């Protein structure tokens, strides 16, 4: 775990809150410079994607939702992308206060409960899981479907998501790559490499044009969020990057991991 820590970006420890922002007609971003949660509004409740680091962050998500006019009482599911504390840490607090159901892969449920160092330190309370999600599973809520794709690598049971977002009556398919950053071991990196190809296939089938992430520092997200908040009606949403943009995104992920794999093989 120490080795992993060396690679962690400094922004991961920056708890400065970001202004809660409506990014699409049905998708809201709440969080800090470290990590954010996404609230996906459906015709029958809200699906929360990830939950930040701890109880304090859980409260920050609740307060941010209220500020955006979303009722936390409506949170139906919390989907946890993977078993690192910065994604599951606020979930139990929200579940206890608003009766949401927590969904997570079984592999990372076990990972969360057996690893207690690195990103899984005492800061982040472990959570109980109601729905053990699997590859290809869909979480449905009213008019909204979230497709779960298992993308092991960042953690053994990391998942990535595909769902639809709306803007001015147009639907766009969004991809959310669940695990930002390669793991330290070579085996994990090889899984990560494979998962990029696997997830990209689904992104292509769904003609995804929007890219969403929990770690805004990784994708120039701070400035995108600011642009979304301050833009005029005729300005494009910077989170819509088009099918070419999505292809570039995956190509870059591949380039980075290939470089790291080659470097590690030479050691
Ligand atoms: Zn992580």
Image: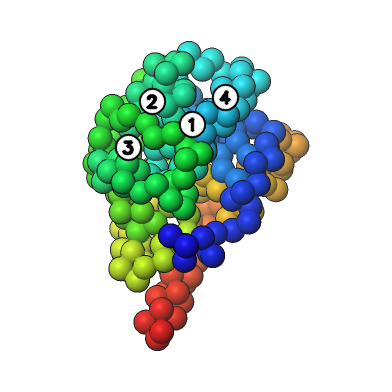
The correct choice, above or below, for 129 with respect to 120 in the image is above
- Give the Cα separation between the discs numbered 4 and 2: 16 Å
Q: How far apart are the two marked residues, 3 and 4, measured between alpha carbons?
A: 21 Å
Q: Residue at x 44, y 29 (%)?
A: 91
Could you tell which of marks 1 and 3 lies nearer the N-terminus?
A: 1
Q: Which numbered disc, 2 or 3, marks the residue closer to the eye?
A: 3
Of the pair 166 and 135, the residue shown nearer to us: 135
Read off the residue under disc 2. 77
Instruction: Decide which of tag 1 and tag 4 comes sooner along the chain.
Output: 4
Residue at 40 percent of width and 75 percent of height:
261
Between 61 and 42, which is closer to the camera in this rendering?
61
Q: Which of the two labelled residues, at mark 2 and mark 3, occupies the earlier sequence position?
A: 2
**3D distance between C-alphas at marks 1 and 4:** 8 Å
Residue on which disc 1 sits: 90
The quadrant of the rendering that contains the N terminus is bottom left
Q: Position of residue 12 (x, y in %)?
A: 59, 50
Q: Which residue is mark 3?
A: 104
Could you say where residue 131 lies in the image, as x and y percent from the top left?
27, 30
């Amino acid at each position: 775990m120490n080795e992993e820590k060396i690679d962690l970006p400094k922004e991961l420890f920056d708890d400065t809150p970001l202004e809660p922002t409506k990014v699409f007609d049905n998708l809201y971003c709440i969080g800090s410079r470290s990590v954010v949660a996404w609230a996906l509004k459906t015709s029958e409740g809200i699906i929360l994607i990830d939950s930040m680091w701890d109880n304090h962050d859980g409260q920050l998500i609740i307060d941010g939702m209220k500020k955006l006019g979303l009722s936390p009482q409506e949170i139906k599911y919390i989907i946890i992308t993977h078993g690192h504390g910065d994604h599951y840490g606020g979930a139990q607090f929200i579940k206890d206060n608003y009766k949401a159901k927590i969904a997570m892969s079984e592999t990372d449920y076990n990972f969360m409960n057996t690893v207690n160092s690195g990103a899984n330190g005492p800061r982040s309370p472990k959570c109980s899981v109601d729905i053990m999600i699997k590859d290809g599973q869909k979480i449905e809520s009213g008019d909204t479907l979230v497709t779960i794709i298992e993308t092991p690598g960042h953690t053994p049971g990391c998942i990535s998501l595909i769902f639809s977002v709306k803007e001015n009556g147009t639907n766009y398919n969004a991809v959310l790559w669940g695990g930002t950053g390669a793991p330290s071991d070579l085996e994990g990196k090889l899984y990560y490499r494979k998962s990029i190809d696997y997830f990209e296939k689904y992104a292509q089938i769904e003609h995804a044009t929007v890219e969403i992430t929990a770690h805004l520092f990784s994708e120039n997200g701070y400035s995108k969020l600011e642009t979304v908040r301050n833009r005029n009606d005729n300005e494009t949403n910077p989170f819509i990057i088009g099918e070419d943009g999505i292809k570039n995104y995956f190509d870059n992920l591949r380039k980075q991991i290939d470089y790291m794999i080659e470097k590690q093989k030479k050691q």
